[in-house]
Image (cartoon, rainbow, N blue to C red):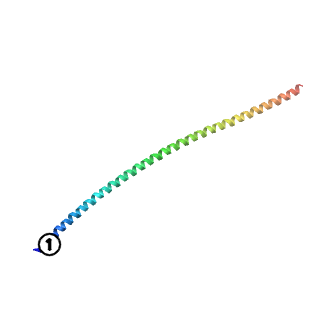
Amino acid sequence: MGNRAHSGGEIAQGEWEIERTRGKIAQGERELEHTRGKIAQGERELERTRGEKSRKVSVKSSILVEKSRKVSEKSSILSEKSRMSSSNSRTLMRKSIVSSTKSRMHTNNSSVIK
């Protein structure tokens, strides 16, 4: 009979260990779910950060495109001013030549009259 009581105690001990193991498994599953939740949260934060960086890069790109357009516009204006200045310079040169020629002709005519 002592054998049976001992055997019953071993069975009870085994059942207790099984329940303890089941508890540890359940706790491990809860921790696993918690970890999965943290991973999912981290992935969402990563996507949000990527989105923010993408928007910032897009804004910076737009600003640079606008600056480039303004520089191009200023360059066109300066080019046009330079062209006009060159044209004015040629016109003044022609007027100077014409004036000089008229002056010489007038001087020549004056000396012929004398």
Residue 20 spot, x, y in % from top left = 22, 63
Q: Quadrant of the C terminus?
A: top right
- 82 to 56, vertically: above or below: above
Q: Residue at x 19, y 68 (%)?
A: 14
Q: Secondary structure at mark 1?
A: helix
Percent x, y of residue 28:
28, 60
- Residue located at (18% from left, 68% from top): 13
The picture places residue 83, in percent across and down from the top left corner, at: 66, 37
Looking at the picture, how far across and down is residue 95, in whole percent? 75, 31
* Residue at 54% over, 42% down: 67
Report the residue that reaches farthest toward the right: 114
Considering depth in this image, is 4 or 70 the residue closer to the camera?
A: 4
Give residue 98's quadrant in the image.
Answer: top right
In the image, taking residue 3 as reference, residue 35 lies left or right, namely right
Q: Quadrant of the N terminus?
A: bottom left
Relative side of 5 to 32, left or right: left
**Depth check, front residue: 21 or 78:** 21
Return the residue at label 1: 6
Amino acid type, residue under disc 1 in the picture: His
- Give the residue at x 25% y 62%: 24
